[in-house]
Image (spheres, helix red, strand yellow):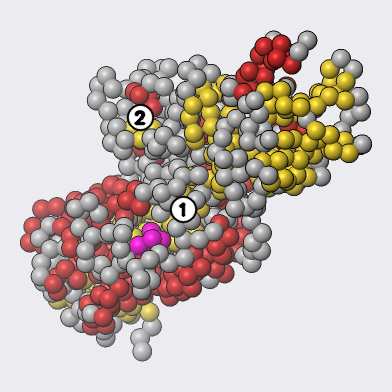
Amino acid sequence: MTIVAKIKQNPQLTHIIDARHHDPFAYLGLHQSDGQYVFRAFQPYASKVWLETPSGWQALQRIHEAGAFEWTGVVPPVVPCKIRLEENGHTWETYDPYSFWPSISTDELYLFGQGRLKQAYLTFGAHLCEQQGVQGVRFAVWAPTAERVSVIGSFNRWDGRIHPMRVHGSSGVWEIFIPNLTTSDLYKFEIRNRHTSHIHVKTDPYGFSFEARPGTSARVTPSGDYVWQDDAWLEQRALADWLHAPLNCYEVHLGSWRRNADGKFLTYRELAHELVPYVQKMGYTHIELLPISEHPLNESWGYQTTGYFAATNRFGSPDDLRYLIDCCHQAGIGVILDWVPGHFPKDDWALARFDGSALYEHEDPRLGEHQDWGTYIFNYGRNEVRNFLLANAHYWLAEFHIDGLRVDAVASMLYLDYSRKAGEWLPNRHGGRENLDAIDFLKQLNVMVHEDFPGALTIAEESTAWPMISRPVYLGGLGFSMKWNMGWMNDTLSYFEHNPVHRRFHHDKLTFGQLYAYSENFVLPFSHDEVVHGKRSLLDKMPGDAWQKFANLRLLMTYQMTMTGKKLNFMGNEFGQGREWNVNSSLDWQLLENHWHQGVQQLNRDLANLYRQLTALHELDFSPEGFEWIDCNDSDQSIINYLRRARDGSFVLVLLNFTPVVRSGYRIGVAKPGYYREIFNSDAACYGGSNTGNGKGLQTEAKPWMGHAQSIVATLPPLGGTIIQLSKPD
């Protein structure tokens, strides 16, 4: 039979040439047939191909003009097979990718199919490795609806015919080892859908780094060789009692915190030497980073992620990020990462309809699309999708020593009818509105984090009354460590925006929060969301003239730092940023040339240090035993007073006056007799205030007041807050 006749009777070769072969390893590479060895290669750009055999280099016969070559012999070549290629007069040697055995184990495939391969990032993506004594890159991707998947890149002219991958049965997992690739190589996956034959070119869902924007290709990346210096931090974190420890977060967007003289981003390493000392000086316990996984658009702030396993290259390499985090830990600062498992963008080169089907999302838009953000919602009921997200959380915690995850938009995950009208959503199997698959995912996430990374935190941004968000899974909760208190934040900012003369009519906004304050482990957040999109900066929200605005802001910070709950502030809040946050420019650091802004910054530094030093201000943040109203009923004068207490019985008094009127001779009931000293006053001159207060201290009188046998007479500064502590007289 002639070669032409063989070709006509060989549909496998036709499928190879047409790039439609579902199992190219069944045809390409080395095989046995009729007592002989047959080696086949498809090299469409080669004019000649040779195979290394025990007797030397043997030329392959071209069996198709498209670039198919074949060799037959009775003595097998050395495996893996080495080939020599000639193209345009240039000759080079390499190994045949179709001579290498599969390297993904059945255990990995099983666990992935069950949604339990926690380190899936070690299986999928592109990994520099050695197989059968040869250096190269092992690629793996999940695309179950594909007829054919190929690796395309700078190393093969982006031609999907050259490196089609092998599929592992019905798992939908595709794999290939390509020799001699380097860390400079860019790549994508070319996927032909088996139902439509449409070709999709996609970046790697598990890619560890990507080319610079606007490019979208993944880059072959070596495993990190960074040598960590934070063993002591991790040991301490594992033993820490975070429920009773201070937590004061500085929320940061790395691209707009500060820029260099040319207006360009600071690198991770530059941030390590500028941001870390600043945060340490200001007394914060943690930095919370807005999403730093790769994203194409600055204006998304990182919340529309396309590279879940890649630290954005805007600021440097993955090891540069490790250096920043390591510097934080050595400075005693924890790092929390803003993480986005609730939705992903519709960019056609990323996760959206990855293999031509609704793979990571739902097919039905009533389940699979987020209408407010124009994004897709993950299909949490699909094991492999859930595994992708769990592995991603594991990756950041394990590979970058992240100390916690702040999970974005939890409410949108929990409710099937979130931001939808009647008829725009589908009920669950019980007819309810709860997203049962998302609930199971969040529980699984929290159990994994707390079991595998002792001391690491998970914090939910959740704005509804869903119960037990921050209660353990074994008690029926979702398992988060903490939850943002959006109700307290909204009530507080609404109250402060009122002119002081009208605040008496809204006094309940200050007191209502204590009715539910201990139903969850709450964080009190003034986040990026409150200083953007026309909401104005915290300073600009405050009513009155310039003096009153700054006094109100100082009072707001005092109220937050002395109320029950952990703390979070967005960058710029700490010195009174005047304009809204702009993602494309630096904070207005020049404002610190003004004494009022200096005063706000000094106040926040002093409050942070007091919060850490005084156990009464943090130890019982989540317990009603840590708080007691002294008087919450003086709405006419817009004054509240409360006590904060520690487990050892020590306490401080907090006196807050929300009007610009000095309240002299104000009597306050106290639990214990003695001499009380004012240890903090937001109206102090050093903060830009009028210096009205109780500098000489306060001696109790045996006059019952507010339910207590003893009382003191204090002066409450205008738009001011003071902290009073039982002390000894000078």
Query: In this view of the protein, which residue sits in the foreground, 634 or 365?
Result: 365
Please report the residue visible at 92 percent of the width from the left and 28 percent of the height from the top: 75
Please report the residue visible at 23 percent of the width from the left and 81 percent of the height from the top: 595
Task: Reply above or below: 470 against 435.
Answer: below
Task: Reply above or below: 196 against 259.
Answer: above
Q: Residue furthest left?
A: 501
Residue 369: give its label.
Answer: 2
Q: Earlier in the sequence, mark 1 or mark 2?
A: 1
Residue wearing tag 1? 212
Task: Reply above or below: 702 against 87.
Answer: below
Answer few, some or many: residues within 10 Å of disc 2's Cα (few below 14, many 20 plus, some between 14 and 19).
many
- Separation of marks 1 and 2 at Cα, in angstroms: 28 Å
Residue 563 percent location from the top left of the image: 33, 60
Q: Is residue 255 magenta?
A: yes
Please report the residue visible at 61 percent of the width from the left and 56 percent of the height from the top: 238
Residue 227 percent location from the top left of the image: 66, 63
Q: Amino acid at mark 2?
A: Glu
Residue 324 percent location from the top left of the image: 52, 65
**Magenta-highlighted residues:** 252-256
Quadrant of the frame with the N terminus = top right
Tell me: 494 left or right of 485. left
Q: Amino acid at mark 1?
A: Ala
